[in-house]
Image: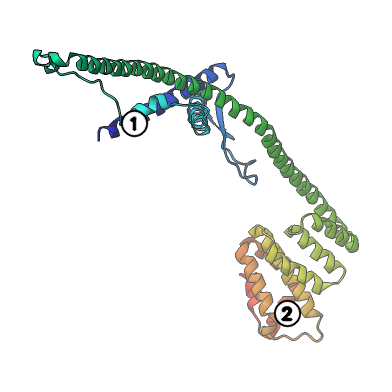
């Protein structure tokens, strides 16, 4: 039972020496370093550019000390397991329960009654003395070996702590430039996207000018070119639909607009405008039929689209009231269909 606390004490002391030595080595490394010890934060490339968080956690000198302690533990473990260093001089005292003790000669052995056995006693005494001298010599030798083993452990821990931080720093210096290149590449990619979006904004205006000047075919070609770069851009899709309308391809224009609401993310204001355009195109198709069938069920979908547009942006109601294509719906009131009249008059 006595060996348990002794072993525990040794283990605690053993690791305290390693940690202390590693910490000292890390501290020495910190004194020779021009900067502080930093850990790199994990960053998501999608949010790294917009994140306000610092890219590193600055541990200061404490980082060197912590890294030195960890490096020392790892190094001593590797040395011990590989057999490069032998610490049995200090571990054997804690874990070896078999210890030799000096032999004590009882005084009765030298009484006068035993004088006739003087020769045998003399031999016994010489053996015992040799035994005790060997134990004493072994004790001194093991004490010296244990002392120098502790010194060796402390020295290796200091060197491991100092060198370990150096190795980590060197590895980080090799890693950091590549990581910075990766970040720079992410930033350049984001900048490239911003430039493309800005150029698309200019091209969207060019498409609008082409449509306004009656060059719908050129507007359609330019729209398709831009959609190859930004396929889910709702404004591009909306202007492509306008170009198709200019070419009198109403069904294709409707199909493009309907696809816009499935694949593109957009503001409520833009969604409302595109919904109004969709309603206009459906009105054009409906009134192209001759004769026009003034039945309420034929205009249910158009009403639903306009209601959705107003729900997205109530201010769009004025645009609905003034739109020349939607004005055709005013004729519905002559056939008892009052919802559009009520919509624009309320």
Badge 2 element:
helix
Where residue 75 appears, as percent x and y from the top left, is 52, 29
Viewer-closest of 118 and 100: 118
Q: Is residue 99 above or below residue 201?
A: above
Where residue 163 appears, as percent x and y from the top left, is 56, 23
Q: Which mark is residue 96?
A: 1
Where residue 48 appears, as percent x and y from the top left, is 63, 41
Q: Which mark is residue 331?
A: 2
Q: Is residue 202 visible?
A: yes
Q: Badge 1: how crowded within 10 Å, few (<14), some, or many (20+)? A: few
- The answer for how far apart the CA atoms under marks 2 and 1 are is 108 Å
Looking at the image, residue 200 sits to the left or right of residue 99; the answer is right
Where residue 3 appears, as percent x and y from the top left, is 29, 33
Q: Which residue corresponds to the image point at 30% horizontal and 27% vertical from the top-left?
A: 99
Report which quarter residue 246 is drawn in: bottom right
Looking at the image, residue 73 sits to the left or right of residue 104; the answer is right
Q: Which residue corresponds to the image point at 29% horizontal and 19% vertical from the top-left?
A: 131
Q: Residue furthest front?
A: 116
Among numbered discs 2 and 1, the one appearing first in the sequence = 1
Q: What is the tally of numbered marks visible in this picture?
A: 2
Which image quarter is the N terminus in? top left
């Amino acid at each position: 039972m006595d060996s348990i606390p002794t072993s525990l004490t040794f283990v605690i002391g053993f690791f305290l020496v390693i940690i202390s030595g590693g910490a000292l080595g890390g501290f020495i490394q910190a004194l020779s370093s021009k900067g502080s010890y930093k850990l790199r934060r994990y960053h998501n490339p999608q949010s790294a550019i917009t994140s306000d968080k610092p890219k590193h956690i600055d541990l200061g000198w404490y980082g060197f000390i912590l890294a030195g302690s960890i490096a020392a533990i790892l190094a001593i473990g590797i040395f011990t397991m590989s057999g490069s260093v032998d610490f049995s001089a200090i571990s054997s005292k804690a874990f070896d329960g078999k210890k030799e003790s000096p032999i004590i000669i009882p005084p009765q052995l030298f009484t006068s009654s035993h004088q006739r056995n003087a020769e045998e006693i003399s031999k016994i005494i010489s053996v015992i003395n040799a035994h005790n001298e060997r134990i004493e010599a072994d004790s001194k030798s093991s004490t010296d070996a244990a002392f120098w083993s502790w010194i060796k452990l402390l020295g290796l821990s200091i060197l491991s702590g100092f060198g370990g931080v150096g190795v980590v720093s060197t590895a980080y210096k090799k890693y950091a430039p590549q990581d910075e290149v990766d970040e720079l590449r992410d930033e350049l990619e984001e900048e490239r996207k911003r430039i493309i979006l800005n150029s698309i904004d200019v091209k969207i205006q060019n498409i609008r000018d082409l449509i306004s000047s009656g060059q719908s075919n050129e507007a359609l070609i330019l729209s398709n070119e831009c959609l190859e770069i930004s396929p889910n851009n709702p404004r591009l899709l909306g202007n492509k639909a306008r170009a198709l309308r200019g070419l009198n391809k109403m069904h294709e224009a409707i199909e493009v607009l309907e696809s816009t609401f499935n694949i593109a993310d957009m503001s409520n204001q833009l969604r409302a405008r595109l919904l109004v355009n969709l309603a206009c195109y459906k009105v054009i198709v409906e009134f192209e039929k001759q004769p026009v069938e003034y039945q309420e069920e034929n205009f249910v979908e158009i009403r639903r689209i306009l209601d959705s547009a107003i729900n997205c942006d109530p201010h769009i109601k004025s645009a609905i009231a003034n739109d020349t294509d939607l004005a055709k719906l005013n004729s519905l009131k002559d056939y008892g269909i009052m919802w559009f009249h009520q919509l624009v008059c309320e």
